[in-house]
Structures are given as C-alpha cells and as structure tokens.
C-alpha cells in the first residue's frame, strides 16, 4: 500500500444464483461483474457459494435421502481451478476492469471446499481463500482450508481481504486479518430465506421458552448485519456485506423432505459498512436483486487506526499473542509439485479451457 488513499466506488451483490446450475450462475455472475464495471465500481463482492448456490438443506434435513441427491448436484456443478468457469470469470473481470471477489463451491480431486476467488482488473486470479472451518453441518459438504489461503492483497485501492460467514466470529481470524493490515473486506454470507431460524433455530427455541419472542421493533438489525458492523469497527475496515436472495428455483429444489413452508422466497440485506460501523451508500429493498454501491473514502482508515490498531499499536503482545501457520496443509505432499496454482495470469486461465 502506498501513501495514496483513494476515493473509489465498490459494489456488493444482493442476488441469487441459478440454483445448482454452475453455467447459469457463472453467466449471471459475469453479467453482474460487467454491470458493476460499467457503473464505475472498482471492486465487487459476492455472497457465499454464489456458484452454484448455498447448500441450505443441511440445516433442515439429515444427510441422506433428498439431501444426498442435492449434494450430488452441488458436486457436479462445483468449480475447478483452473477451468472453464474460472476462465469466464477472469474474462468478465478483465472486460469490466474491476477487482472481483466471488465465492464458489470449489472441487479439488474428490472433495469440495468453500472458497473466495480474487481476480484483478487484468483478469488474473491473484488469490484464493478457503473457509478454515465449515460451520456445523456444513462439514457434510466442505473440507477445511489452511493458513496458506488467508490472503490480504495489496492493491491501488487498498489492502483487500475477505472471509466467509461464521469466520467473522472467530476472534483469532480477525486478529490475523488485522495483523496483515486489511483495509477493504468482502464478507460473503449465505442465504437467510428460512421461515424461522435456520441454523439458529435451536437457540431460538430456548430463548422463546424462557423469555418469549423478541420484538422486531426492538431488533431491527439482523444478526448478520450486527456481525458485519462489528467486524468493520473491530478491524478498522470497509466491509462489503454480500447477501443472497432466495429465488423460487431454490425453494422448489429444497422443499422435498422438509415440512411445508420451510423456505421462503426473499432475503437480502447487502450493504457497505464504513470503519465507524455506519452503513453507507444506497441499499436496495429486501428480496430485490441488484447491486449495492457506495463510495469508499479510504482515508477514513487512517483515523480509525489512530484510535485502535489491534494488529499494531493496540496489540498487547506482553499479555496475548497469536501464532499463525501460513503453511499449506495438503492431504498428501507431492515432492516437486506446487501445492496451490494461484496466482494464475489471464492468459493461463484462458489456455486452461
């Protein structure tokens, strides 16, 4: 990062994919990337597992039966790196002249991983992050990432990074991102189109038993927005909070084997959050697909750090410290073979098709 702290436009996606359809989801993602570029954005972020869709069934049904059939569709529509899907995303980033952070279900050999792929405006795949620990029953679906895939990327628009879903609640992960001096963050979140609770339902049952239902008027902000605003303030970053919209094709695919009305069309809530925790830019209504835009005055980070830099002057290494293992952790070490093909230049990605 240089001494320059630019003002630039960013875009957070609020949209659903073509559910469990890799090619359809890639086509939709590329259209959103090009739209953001045409509207002057220099960075776009996507929701969790946008390609080919979030496996929401795991929180409402067991691992067998219809769930296993849906897993088969997810597996067959997962993204390989490199491959044709990555090449199409690369071309879209280049056409739009924009930084792209898109979350996909990635297939490597026989397993699936939840990933964020980072492209620069030249179309190069410059970084990859895999979720370090899938949450709860997500472990039926995805393997674990490692410390070699926890990037913060120096760029002309700031130091760029991202996390997936519940990683934002792991203090040591946010401490690691602070140490790496992250400045602009993509928070990729899953769907929230459950009729009640989703993964929180067991907690809500206990709460309602002893306290009773809470008032929506007293709780206007969703838990995911609370977490995203906290991350912005705790790490002194701008946060692109990127949320799914659950569409009818997803509800139809998820419905078998579940009680009636388990899922609903709707959701959303994407926004862009400043380091002081404020929501900035122009949001769009819940359930509506589109892009949330905001201007990012990166200079705010200087004065956020003036107050508190937990990765630097506000750390307390004489009391607390963090050990970071940045080494790859492959299932098998192959002597002479690279563990991670990223970064990959635009020409290499196009040649992989």
Image: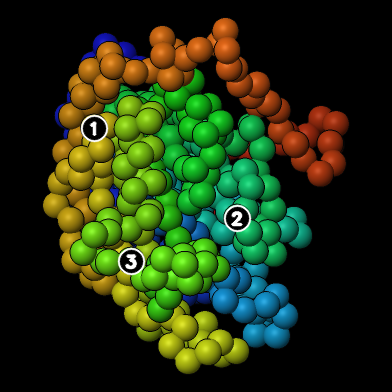
The secondary element bearing badge 2 is classed as loop
Q: Which mark is residue 246?
A: none
Q: Position of residue 211 (x, y in %)?
A: 41, 66
Residue that extends furthest to the front in the rendered view of this protein:
210
- Given residues 82 and 256, the one toward you in this image is 256
* Dot in front, 2 or 3: 3
Residue carrying label 3: 214
Within 10 Å of disc 1 (Cα), the crowding (few <14, some 14-19, many 20+) is some
Q: Please, is residue 146 above or below residue 268 in the view?
A: above
**Residue at image point 14% right, 52% down:** 282
Query: Of callouts 1 and 2, which one flags the residue occurring earlier in the amino acid sequence?
Result: 2
- Picture coordinates of residue 28, whole percent (x, y): 36, 66
Lower position in the chain sequence, tag 1 or tag 3: 3
Query: How far is the residue under mark 1 from the one under mark 3?
Result: 27 Å
- Distance between the alpha carbons at the discs numbered 1 and 2: 28 Å
**Quadrant location, the N terminus:** top left
Q: Residues within 10 Å of mark 3 (few under 14, many from 20)?
A: few
Q: Who's the residue at 76% across and 60% down the image?
A: 110
Residue 348 picture location, percent across and down: 55, 42
- Which residue bears the numbered disc 2? 135
Judge from the rendering whether residue 147 lies leftward or rightward of residue 316; answer left or right.
right
């Amino acid at each position: 990062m240089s001494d320059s702290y630019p003002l630039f436009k960013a875009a957070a996606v609020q949209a659903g994919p073509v559910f469990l359809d890799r090619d359809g989801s890639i086509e939709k993602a590329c259209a959103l990337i090009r739209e953001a570029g045409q509207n002057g954005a220099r960075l776009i972020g996507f929701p969790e597992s946008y390609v080919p869709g979030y496996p929401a069934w795991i929180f409402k049904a067991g691992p067998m039966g219809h769930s296993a059939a849906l897993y088969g569709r997810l597996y067959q529509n997962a993204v390989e790196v490199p491959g044709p899907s990555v090449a199409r995303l690369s071309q879209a980033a280049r056409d739009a002249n924009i930084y792209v952070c898109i979350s996909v279900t990635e297939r490597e050999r026989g397993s699936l991983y939840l990933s964020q792929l980072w492209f620069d405006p030249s179309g190069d795949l410059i970084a990859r992050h895999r979720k370090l620990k899938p949450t709860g029953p997500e472990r039926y679906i995805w393997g674990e990432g490692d410390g070699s895939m926890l990037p913060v990327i120096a760029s002309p628009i700031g130091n760029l990074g991202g996390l997936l879903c519940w990683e934002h609640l792991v203090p040591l992960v946010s401490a690691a991102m602070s140490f790496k001096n992250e400045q602009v963050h993509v928070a990729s979140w899953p769907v929230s189109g459950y009729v009640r609770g989703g993964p929180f339902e067991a907690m809500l049952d206990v709460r309602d038993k002893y306290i009773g239902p809470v008032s929506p008027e007293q709780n206007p902000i969703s838990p995911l927005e609370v977490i995203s605003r906290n991350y912005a303030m705790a790490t002194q970053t701008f946060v692109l909070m990127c949320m799914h919209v659950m569409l009818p094709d997803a509800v139809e695919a998820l419905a078998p084997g579940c009680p009636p009305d388990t899922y609903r069309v709707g959701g959303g809530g994407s926004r862009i959050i400043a380091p002081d925790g404020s929501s900035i830019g122009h949001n769009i209504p819940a359930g509506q697909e589109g892009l949330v835009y905001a201007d990012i005055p990166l200079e705010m980070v200087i004065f956020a750090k003036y107050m508190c830099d937990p990765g630097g002057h506000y750390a307390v290494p004489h009391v607390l410290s963090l050990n970071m293992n940045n080494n790859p952790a492959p299932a098998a070490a192959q002597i002479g073979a690279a563990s991670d093909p990223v970064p990959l230049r635009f020409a290499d990605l196009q040649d992989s098709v």
